Amino acid sequence: MYKNIFAIGPLIQNTLILTPNPKPVKLTFLIHCPDQAGIISSVTSFLHQNGGNVIYLDQHVDKEAGVFFMRLESDFQQNTDKQVLRASFQGELANRYEMEWSIHQERIKPRMAIFVSKYKHCLYDLLSRYQSGELLVEIPFILSNHQDLSFIADQFQIPFHHVPVSKELREKAAQQQLDLIEEHHVDFVVLARYMQIISPRVIEALPNRIINIHHSFLPAFAGAKPYHAAFKRGVKIIGATSHYVTEELDAGPIIAQDVATVSHSHFIEDLVAVGRDLEKIVLSKAVQLHVKRKTMVYNNRTVVFT
Amino acid sequence: MYKNIFAIGPLIQNTLILTPNPKPVKLTFLIHCPDQAGIISSVTSFLHQNGGNVIYLDQHVDKEAGVFFMRLESDFQQNTDKQVLRASFQGELANRYEMEWSIHQERIKPRMAIFVSKYKHCLYDLLSRYQSGELLVEIPFILSNHQDLSFIADQFQIPFHHVPVSKELREKAAQQQLDLIEEHHVDFVVLARYMQIISPRVIEALPNRIINIHHSFLPAFAGAKPYHAAFKRGVKIIGATSHYVTEELDAGPIIAQDVATVSHSHFIEDLVAVGRDLEKIVLSKAVQLHVKRKTMVYNNRTVVFT
Amino acid sequence: MYKNIFAIGPLIQNTLILTPNPKPVKLTFLIHCPDQAGIISSVTSFLHQNGGNVIYLDQHVDKEAGVFFMRLESDFQQNTDKQVLRASFQGELANRYEMEWSIHQERIKPRMAIFVSKYKHCLYDLLSRYQSGELLVEIPFILSNHQDLSFIADQFQIPFHHVPVSKELREKAAQQQLDLIEEHHVDFVVLARYMQIISPRVIEALPNRIINIHHSFLPAFAGAKPYHAAFKRGVKIIGATSHYVTEELDAGPIIAQDVATVSHSHFIEDLVAVGRDLEKIVLSKAVQLHVKRKTMVYNNRTVVFT
Amino acid sequence: MYKNIFAIGPLIQNTLILTPNPKPVKLTFLIHCPDQAGIISSVTSFLHQNGGNVIYLDQHVDKEAGVFFMRLESDFQQNTDKQVLRASFQGELANRYEMEWSIHQERIKPRMAIFVSKYKHCLYDLLSRYQSGELLVEIPFILSNHQDLSFIADQFQIPFHHVPVSKELREKAAQQQLDLIEEHHVDFVVLARYMQIISPRVIEALPNRIINIHHSFLPAFAGAKPYHAAFKRGVKIIGATSHYVTEELDAGPIIAQDVATVSHSHFIEDLVAVGRDLEKIVLSKAVQLHVKRKTMVYNNRTVVFT
């Protein structure tokens, strides 16, 4: 009927901690299911009865598709047995409402790999946010089809893997990427202006977990050289679009977009310069939304709870 | 402890309609109360048990003030006895959680009076939206301290009242305004660039139900001649702010703001021209939010559910 | 080699006025020609020597196409013989630099016809600006393929012509449009959400003088039903684009664009509502730029001096 | 009468280079003087006669103050004797029109010192642009009143000076700053969230050459803790402002501003997070405008030619 295709985060470990004055644990629930009456009431009652205190709830109904989406944040006591909670949720709610769902624990940082080519701005922006503590992820490695940016990986003391890509090496490169992703338990990949097609095998391994930045206001100017195309068309506003990668190029679910005003006086190199700022801000925004579990994907569209 | 100061809309009449295939009635609930665990669960369960189907829920907690806010839209059957529903809500929920609350029925149009002076742009914008069916209100009258814009009232066939204001006439004018407001069962007033101070007596009669547009990005440039002040300060962005009127000038709860880019090449008259578009769009946006019951007021701030 | 395709405004009459203290006359010059050294110096010297005082100058070079553009505003004495000035300009400058050029006199209002179908918002916005004195044009008539909006023409006391369009009537309608345009000395036409294809004959009669508003961020979502397409694609920003009409649908030179943020919670009707505000603001902005002679067209792109 | 207070860049050396096919040298002229007829014509003719080819001209008249501003870019042959050019310009033009003026040579990079405290985002943004070649400056040193960010200086291999500030050390610190500025031939200073008052002595040494970023939409929320104030006032938009430092706190000439939309759901820490992106983008934009000689200052306002 319909299918869960949004990212499942790192599994929550079963924990049992007994401390005298435990600080609460915040769990985030992402749920979607066929729309029907009573879901909000059922879920909030369930959480209440299981010791949860709902501190945030956002919901959305796609009336056309008849699908209900919900994101909840709920505080629980430290000693809550999450294994039991998960089992109860599945038994009492998920089966009944045919839910696809996941629970995420705030304090477990997702593991994010970065793929780059030769452009520095998005990479620098991600790494400086990481270094500053703005972006709560682990970065097991940076991968590139070129050697050029290894010095930036060095600046931030992150392992760098050079995986060359060419017609002949395409399959080998995909395998190297998959091996690194598996070996390092990568949760999601960010393409920080990575100028190569991602292999369908890699996309399949990380469904809705590869985030790309395209340097145009999609769907305008999909494909190569969008700034040249924008200049030729004489647009007065340019944009950048961050989206999950699907097999169709530049056609995946959009996470975030932003735009900037330009004029006839902007030549292509000026559009590129203006675009750099858009690209890095939009990509980092999309990455943050993903990390904070604020995105859900359905029918090639995103629900973004902000 | 804390006080309900947001607008209460037109009261819902007790209705009892029996039809074979009744279309559902949409009711909007606005609730705020001291924050505590279990409110969402209690309210949604209550509605579910009383035949409601929650189609939209948005909630907010002001952690600093310890106040919980909720806006719900729920479908009910046509023959729902709203008198009974209201009594049950009060008895089962509102007392228990110390709620301030109101229910609004979508199809009852609120009655909006417009106060103007000599500027035409905001008045035209409101009236053209009204005439186009964008803005679902009744407009019992337009009031002005000048005669100049009576021709616009004529264009749209809306009664026009000339209520002059001067030092000597101030008290008399306030009384005339109050009389008109009462006589025409006015729910809220829009100051569409009305260039006179509103009397405290009028403000008191319509708490958080008088909407003003100020032609600056408040709190910058409060008071008179904000475009002159903006020019003098050399700002690169100007703004407009719509807010509920309180006794302190330009200091009421902000509903909506927007900005536009300007440069050194904009003289004061250019700022005025750019500002006109901002003013009319921001004012109409705020009016729409109010009409759609998307605003709540607390501690001189608004919660705006969009 | 290259061709002047931007609008030539109403011709300036030869005047000779002798008054004791004449207020200066402001003339606006639009010039483009093959790029070469010394043009600015030559033109400003010419104007200085002919009694002009340059109060504004903006210039642009399209390096790729090798074309120079300039817009000048210059004050002249009331009794300046413009016929002589034009002849000198042609003889001393235009021939030498192979210029395409036009002169516009500020106080002569261009004559603007409005074509509409059934949507009210853009029409109301243009008429209220006209009535308020914001938009300095004459409006000889409003034309529509439907009768619905004749009441708005009545509100503003502007002649209304109903020119039905159907497969069979297409040619006849084009002829009626052309006749009205000629009869009323129309300088330019604004399509305020006119939902019919403009005949190539009409386009030819008014090159770069028909302004359309398209309800998307072109080139994204050209053609019919852009809000449906935007919803389906799941974009996070929608836009509106005003452009000169050319034979290729939605592909003419862009004059102005603007955007607004949307989310998954916006259904198609919400996008339509958000879009209405964009459409009317962007169309009016483009019309103002055209009226103030701030646009030039070359290679299907605009130069917009702001 | 009026006074030149904008920054004078690094002096242009007198050069005499003879090469067979010399690439042209681009010089940028910044000029302001009392407004009068014929200036543009005089300057462009002078440049034309002295072998210059004007490739860009922007001009502005502050009608209120009666001051004329111009920015020109002109290509000259490599072997142009700039000493002679400067002398002629002074003799033939500057004296006659009472001009304040400066000439800047594109290829000479200005020397930019960065002052920081403990916030990383602006520093990282500037350094990553510098490292990427986006920002064409020399960075002789980073100075801080804390040791915390020395590791970032190390990452980018830039000298770091720790200059503590306290009530007792204020005068000593100012002297250390002045000594470093002089020793390293610093052209301008960027305060990348430097949380100390700059001594009047330092401001005097670098008039309109110290660029600050303030984390609010000035003049709203000047002074300390603007995000707290913005939260309290309940604004719907927050901003950041970059300005030249003058003795009056947060009151200097504004170079660039930008804003972002917020809502009731943003607590102070959310405003801080949104604000970080604004701050770094706005500061870098202002620095670029300064480096490209696109700013002029007059009457505590900027003219920014873009």
Image: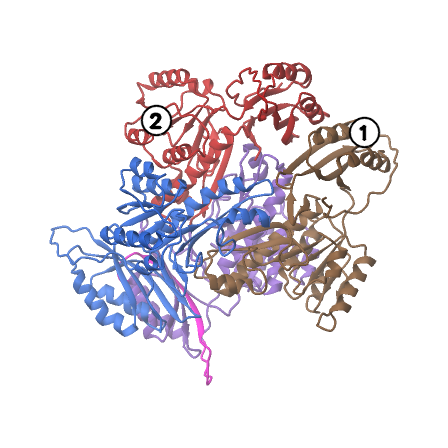
Chain colours: A blue, B purple, C brown, D red
Tell me the amino acid under the disc marked 1. Answer: Asn
Q: Position of residue B194 (x, y in %)?
A: 60, 49
Considering the numbered disc 2 on the image, is that residue within a helix, a strand or a loop? loop
Residue A161, x across and y down, in percent = 29, 44
Q: Position of residue A71 (x, y in %)?
A: 32, 60
Q: Nearer the viewer, residue A167 or C111?
A: A167
The answer to whether residue A282 is left or right of residue B234 is: left
x and y percentages locating residue A285 in the rendered image:
39, 49
| Number of numbered markers | 2
| Label annotation for residue D158 | 2
Query: In this image, B13 relative to B94: left or right?
Result: right
The secondary element bearing badge 1 is classed as: loop
Q: Is residue B159 above or below residue B227?
A: below
| Residue that protrudes farthest toward the front in the picture | A168
Q: Please say whether residue D201 is one of the residues in the magenta stretch.
A: no
Q: Amino acid at mark 2?
A: Ile
Residue B186 in sight from this viewpoint: no
Q: Which residue is mark 1?
A: C50
10 Å neighbourhood of mark 1: few (<14), some, or many (≥20)? some
Q: Which residues are magenta?
A: B15-38
